[in-house]
Amino acid sequence: MLKKIMRSKLTWFFILLLALFYLYRVAPIFVSPSESKNLRDFFPMTKGSTWEYQGEGNEYASFSREVLFLQDNKAQLREDNGGTVSISVLQVTDQEISRIYFQGEAYEDTNVINQEPNDHTIILKLPLSVGTKWDVPHGNREIVSINATVETPAGSFTNCIKVKVTQENSTIFEYFKQDVGLVKREFFSEGTQVTSSLETYHINP
């Protein structure tokens, strides 16, 4: 009788071991899609890549972006909204993508990628899951969806990361698509709505 009990316990022990082995072997298949993505996927930073955005609600809502310079984990972008040209330097780490330099008026394509940082605005950070929240100058940012669908002139984009930017008198929603980047931005303030939607883009390999 004792031997039967011991054999039964050993049998259940090995079944448990097999179940655990199966769980750990198969678990990666069931990882949330957002957890398996790299931050760089949402900011394709290859020199010469361009994005054109169609605007509504404000004459400066339409704008274009281009990656001008690259160095290590940093990229310099030029943004032109028809009224002014600005430049930003983005830095990618294992945990976040942040804007470390910003110049509001820059009409020449000067390489400033190694300028002394004058900003630290985290644009996106891990984990890429609903509820991830962090402070930025004059407000905070929070991931509110990891599977948003966005309609733009450039097409329909699914499984977008939706980020809510809360400031004192306004709310902004930004949508990021893997391997594309920013596909839409919505600005709301006291009854005013301004939208910038991706119209065309070209990602250099």
Image (cartoon, rainbow, N blue to C red):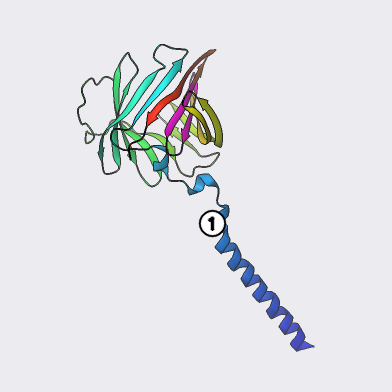
Q: How many marks?
A: 1
Task: Give the left or right position of residue 77, taking residue 146 as reference.
Answer: left
What is the quadrant of the C terminus in the image?
Answer: top left
Task: Give the left or right position of residue 138, taking residue 151 as reference.
Answer: left
Looking at the image, which residue is at 35% across and 17% down? 81
Which stretch appears magenta? 167-186
Residue 175 is inside the magenta segment: yes
Foreground of the two, 115 or 145: 145
Foreground of the two, 6 or 82: 82
Q: 52 above or below 130?
A: above
Looking at the image, which residue is at 72% across and 83% down? 7
Where residue 127 appears, as percent x and y from the top left, is 48, 44
Task: Give the left or right position of residue 15, taking residue 93 as reference.
Answer: right
Looking at the image, which residue is at 56% across and 33% down? 148
Name the chief secondary structure element in magenta: strand
Residue 137 is inside the magenta segment: no
Q: Single out the residue that lies furthest toward the right.
A: 1
Residue 45 in which image quadrant: top left
Q: 169 above or below 141?
A: above
Q: 12 above or below 124?
A: below
Where residue 91 appears, as percent x and y from the top left, is 32, 39
Q: 88 above or below 159?
A: above
Task: Specify few, some or many for label 1: CA neighbours under 10 Å numbering under 14, 14-19, or 20 or more.
Answer: few
Looking at the image, which residue is at 26% across and 19% down? 105
What is the quadrant of the N terminus in the image?
Answer: bottom right
- In this figure, which residue is indicated by the disc labeled 1? 28
Foreground of the two, 155 or 107: 155
Where residue 67 appears, as percent x and y from the top left, is 30, 32
Instruction: Tell me the amino acid under the disc marked 1.
Output: Pro
Badge 1 marks a residue whose secondary structure is helix
Residue 146 in which image quadrant: top right
